[in-house]
Image (cartoon, rainbow, N blue to C red):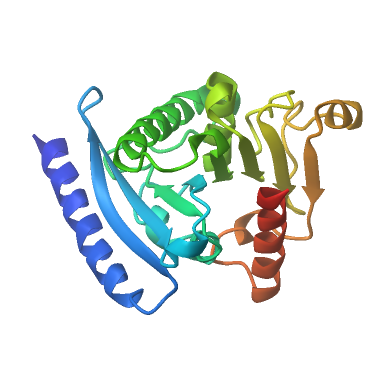
């Protein structure tokens, strides 16, 4: 019963936060909707923020699903932690869905053991969240170009995004990893893969392709001068401009 009460309280605070943010974004060049999907099969709430360009004339109908980095189960990451990127992409005519992967009642992310194994349940849950949200938006927004679906994820969200591409490559057109460090990138040309790397953390062994593999599969690796923790809203204006420019260039490639 205690966990049920905590779960209800967490949803209440999430919904309160949503209302405040929508009011603040009325004058921007995108439309923001927030809602909470519910996966009955897992008895799990999945809060999402949906960004759509206001200018329907230039709307490219390409969907992007974004997954945030680890936020210690505090909540709100999907809505507040990466707005420089989600809002930018919506302003450039993309349909962006940002998923809240962590709930206050979840177990904290493993910090010990072989992380590729101890964190795997967290990533698997993220994969199921992405898959469920994808199926929901396919029904609610059938006009979108799902054959051009792009997945973007930072850090732990990057690991779950990469795992999704391993398990469901036929569903993904482009994969953009923002410094995922544990789950190895697929060695494949489909989906297309772009990875932005930080300057302060290295990836685990075999996460990144060799030069030969990158050339063979046309995988793009960008070793940036940006810290791992500065790929969210902590990024400086210069860093934001670099990240958004590189991501937009890859999307348009």
Q: Quadrant of the N terminus?
A: top left
Percent coordinates x, y for residue 171 in the rendering: 52, 27
Q: Residue furthest right?
A: 212
Q: Is residue 11 left or right of residue 115?
A: left
Percent coordinates x, y for residue 206 in the rendering: 76, 26
Q: Is residue 19 left or right of residue 89?
A: left
Q: Residue furthest front?
A: 57
Q: Is residue 195 left or right of residue 230?
A: right
Residue 15 in view here: yes
The residue lying at 51 percent from left, 66 percent from top is 91
Percent coordinates x, y for residue 73 in the rendering: 36, 46
Q: Is residue 35 left or right of residue 100?
A: left
- Give the mark count: 0
Residue 114 in view here: no
Q: Determine which quarter of the picture holds residue 173.
A: top right
Q: Residue furthest bottom?
A: 27
Foreground: 94 or 13?
94
The residue lying at 72 percent from left, 65 percent from top is 242
Foreground: 75 or 20?
20
Asked if residue 6 is positioned above or below residue 34 in the image, the reply reads: above
The residue lying at 73 percent from left, 23 percent from top is 188
């Amino acid at each position: 019963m205690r966990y049920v009460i905590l779960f209800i309280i967490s949803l209440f605070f999430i919904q309160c936060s949503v209302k405040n943010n929508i009011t603040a974004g009325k004058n921007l060049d995108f439309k923001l909707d927030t809602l909470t999907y519910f996966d009955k099969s897992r008895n799990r709430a999945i809060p999402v923020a949906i960004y759509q360009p206001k200018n329907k004339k230039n709307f490219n109908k390409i969907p992007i699903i974004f997954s945030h980095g680890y936020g210690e189960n505090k909540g709100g990451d999907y809505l507040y932690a990466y707005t420089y990127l989600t809002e930018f992409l919506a302003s450039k005519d993309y349909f962006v869905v940002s998923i809240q992967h962590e709930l206050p009642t979840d177990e904290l992310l493993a910090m010990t053991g072989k992380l590729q194994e101890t964190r795997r349940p967290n990533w698997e849950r993220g994969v199921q969240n992405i898959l469920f949200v994808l199926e929901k938006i396919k029904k609610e927004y059938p006009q979108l170009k799902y054959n051009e679906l792009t997945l973007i994820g930072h850090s732990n969200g990057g690991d779950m995004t990469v795992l999704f591409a391993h398990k469901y490559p036929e569903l993904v057109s482009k994969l953009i990893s923002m410094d995922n460090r544990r789950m190895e990138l697929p060695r494949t040309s489909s989906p297309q893969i772009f990875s932005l790397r930080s300057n302060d953390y290295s990836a685990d062994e075999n996460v990144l392709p060799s030069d030969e593999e990158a050339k063979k599969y046309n995988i793009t690796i960008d070793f940036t001068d940006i810290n791992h923790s500065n790929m969210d809203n902590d990024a400086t204006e210069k860093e934001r401009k670099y990240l958004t420019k590189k991501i937009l260039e890859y999307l348009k490639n």
